[in-house]
Image: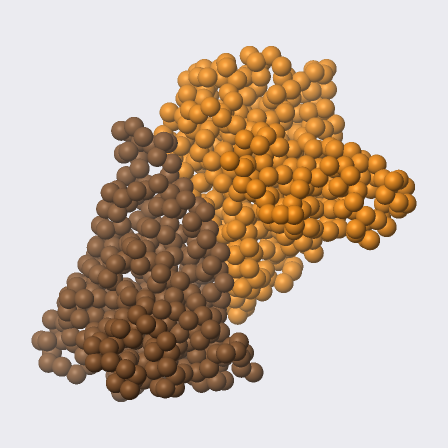
Chain colours: A brown, B orange
Amino acid sequence: MLDRPPNPYRVFADRDVVDHLADLPEVSEILGGAKRDWRVRDVADGNLNAVFLVDGPRGGVCLKQALPYVRVAGESWPLDVKRANYEAAYLARLAPHVGGLAPKLYAYDPEQFVIVMEKLDPHIILRRGLIAGQRFPKAPEHVAEFVAQAAFHTSDLAVPFERKAADVALFAQNLALQRITVDLVFTVPYIEVWRNQVTAPLAAWAAALRADIGLKSAVAHFRLRYLTTQQSLLHGDLHSGSVMATRDDTRVIDGEFALVGPTGFDVGNFLAHYAIAWYAKPFHAGAPEAIAAYRDAIADDIARFWLTFRRRFLEIWRDEDASGDALPQGHFADAAGQARLETFRQSYVEAIFRDAVGYLAIKTIRRIIGYAQIADFLAIEDEERRAEAQAGALALARALLKRPESFPDIAAIVDALPLYEGAGLDPKRAPA
Amino acid sequence: MLDRPPNPYRVFADRDVVDHLADLPEVSEILGGAKRDWRVRDVADGNLNAVFLVDGPRGGVCLKQALPYVRVAGESWPLDVKRANYEAAYLARLAPHVGGLAPKLYAYDPEQFVIVMEKLDPHIILRRGLIAGQRFPKAPEHVAEFVAQAAFHTSDLAVPFERKAADVALFAQNLALQRITVDLVFTVPYIEVWRNQVTAPLAAWAAALRADIGLKSAVAHFRLRYLTTQQSLLHGDLHSGSVMATRDDTRVIDGEFALVGPTGFDVGNFLAHYAIAWYAKPFHAGAPEAIAAYRDAIADDIARFWLTFRRRFLEIWRDEDASGDALPQGHFADAAGQARLETFRQSYVEAIFRDAVGYLAIKTIRRIIGYAQIADFLAIEDEERRAEAQAGALALARALLKRPESFPDIAAIVDALPLYEGAGLDPKRAPA
């Protein structure tokens, strides 16, 4: 059953971790001391991989190994270890553009499928912080900057098509995790299968969405765009669990889903997980005033993320070398041509927004009536209350997919958040 | 200067051709007799490659070798011989779907970049036939069938995304000829450079199109779609010079530009070259009645090509296994879902038409104010008269790009052909 990785691959135990790092002079230097001084902690937190933090007398590093199966599911769900190749390639490809917004890559071992990178300390996973009610005021701007830089510099706006084709050719081989996206994001939530894990009181909502041809048609539209649009190199899984933050520093991690796809896919995914946090928050513990203030801050984060992305993407396009093959400079050289170029920029970013609205909705739905449930909601122990929180998010998602024209800008989405929060467990009585 | 192909590559002389074929038992069998009985003819006709026809006592074959430069330009314009890899891969990929509509591939040698394939006899290049006023009544339907089969079976409608990703990863490495498309189709015609070869009396038209921001904006739109849309495996250079025909048989040849791109690119390219034939025809020798009748037949060919493509694409989609990742069967299983699927089919094919209209116009323009001029017009020796023929085609192309909404279907394009034929040499006085 299990698709065995090639020899000499082995699943690392603590001792393998230490031995592996000791063979890397640059990393040994960062850790300081000798092997016996290094402390290894298994801190795997995501769904897929083994992750170790290693501390030495001088410093620490993070080691991530792709396991030949889905970690949270076990060996019954095999998963190609080569995904680590693409995470390493993604980090390397973006490093010149995103600077300190991603962890530094120290080493990659393509035989053990092991990435050694910067240890992020005292960063925590953004999602955990959101659930705990901590504020990360800079995270929206930082992630927006990351996405804007990646979206521009890996697109036909910035590079000759041969350079983009090299990314396309490489990441078109990153199949195992893209298959997860195709199945678990775009397909499985809309059919009845054992893998979906729907909170019992949400059964009517799940049934309604699965019967809704208009909604599934919108999903089909965005699914086809995901499959056929090669706009820029994407993270491919940019939710709040793929960001580590402190109050002042933010890092995007876990690029193993990387693909060349529609830019709005990353944008919408990140927005979705702030929206989810907003709907979940009142059902977490806390004083009502504190919760209300925190939600306002999250709503503000949503607007700031998009507005920063939009502003930075346009600034980079205007200011930096836009000598890719998309728009030959010589075609729009005079003053009128320059004016038209600005129109192109505006409509390009508007098209990203349209995509982002769709993917926001689709990513929200898959977290609620699909397989990969999310801690924001799972933290709400009472199933009825959890379902109430989820119903609000589902009602927003349904509106975004079925009435996209009602959401011309990010303000309309932020405005709509409270409209749907009392949606309730009967999808027919919920606002449309 | 010249980017040398790897050893042991050598440019074949007649004797190399014979020696090469003698090493292929299956091919020797087709030819019959022995090496000394084989007659070799150099019949290179296109712009890029060496082509030999070899006849033996029993039968004949065609041998095509990629040269390390553009054949018609000489060694000063180097061109990567690896393009032959992609032509061979394209033939092999489509063979199960297009049957006898392409030449049979007998052998491919990746060291000599030599393709050995079926000799087409008594086929002639469709363009030569169109110029000579010969009728190929089945060519439009046959090429439409070819394009429909390729467009469906290599798309996400038919195959799991992993299969399409394999095509994407392979053909994303076919860079040399795609660079020619990006430059010579989408860029160079719209700027003043030495490579463009504009008939002198057409100078005002060339200047007008190069100054027309609306037109260049439409070109930019279709250029970006070419660069970012991965819908199906394309021929990439599907003009009337890439088709060989008799009255009853039709073959698509020369797939070395192959890429995964927007389906409408092939469709529009083929339409463009019928439209070009229509505008050129009155300036070729012949009795007026015969020419008028022939033009009506070409107009009919244009409509039949599109209508056949449309009908066959939809039939294949409805009838064959549409189990690709684009539209999960389970999402649209009931009667209402089936109705919606039909709406998807209609709008998918309508989007191909919109693309085809744009590429029809862009391919027409590049043949007139760009580098790769075309025999249909070059056959008109008098420059003034040639320019008049070309002006009609340019006026149609301008309208298609600037007023696409005026051309909702193929009938509107066929109807518009005579509207623009007297456009004349002053682009300001020509119908818009």
Q: Residue at x 42, y 71 (%)?
A: A109
Query: Residue B118 or A37: which is nearer the viewer?
Result: A37
Q: Residue at x 57, y 42 (%)?
A: B4
In the rendered image, the quadrant that contains the C terminus of chain B is top left
Percent across and percent down for residue B175 are 51, 46
Query: Residue A254 or A12: which is nearer the viewer?
Result: A12
Snapshot quadrant of residue A394: bottom left
Rendered position, A74 above or below A230? below
Snapshot quadrant of residue A379: bottom left
Count of numbered labels shown in the rendering? 0
Is residue A33 in view?
A: yes
Percent across and percent down for residue A310 are 25, 51
Query: Residue B160 or B340: which is nearer the viewer?
Result: B160
Rendered position, B174 above or below A327? below
Q: Is residue B400 left or right of residue A38?
A: right
The residue most toward the left is: A289
Rendered position, B109 above or below A68? above
Is residue B140 in view?
A: no
Query: Residue B191 or B335: which is nearer the viewer?
Result: B191
Q: Residue at x 42, y 50 (%)?
A: A164
Q: Residue at x 75, y 41 (%)?
A: B16
Percent across and percent down for residue B413 are 55, 32
Q: Is residue A280 left or right of residue A401?
A: left
Percent across and percent down for residue B382 are 60, 12
Q: Is residue A296 left or right of residue A222?
A: left
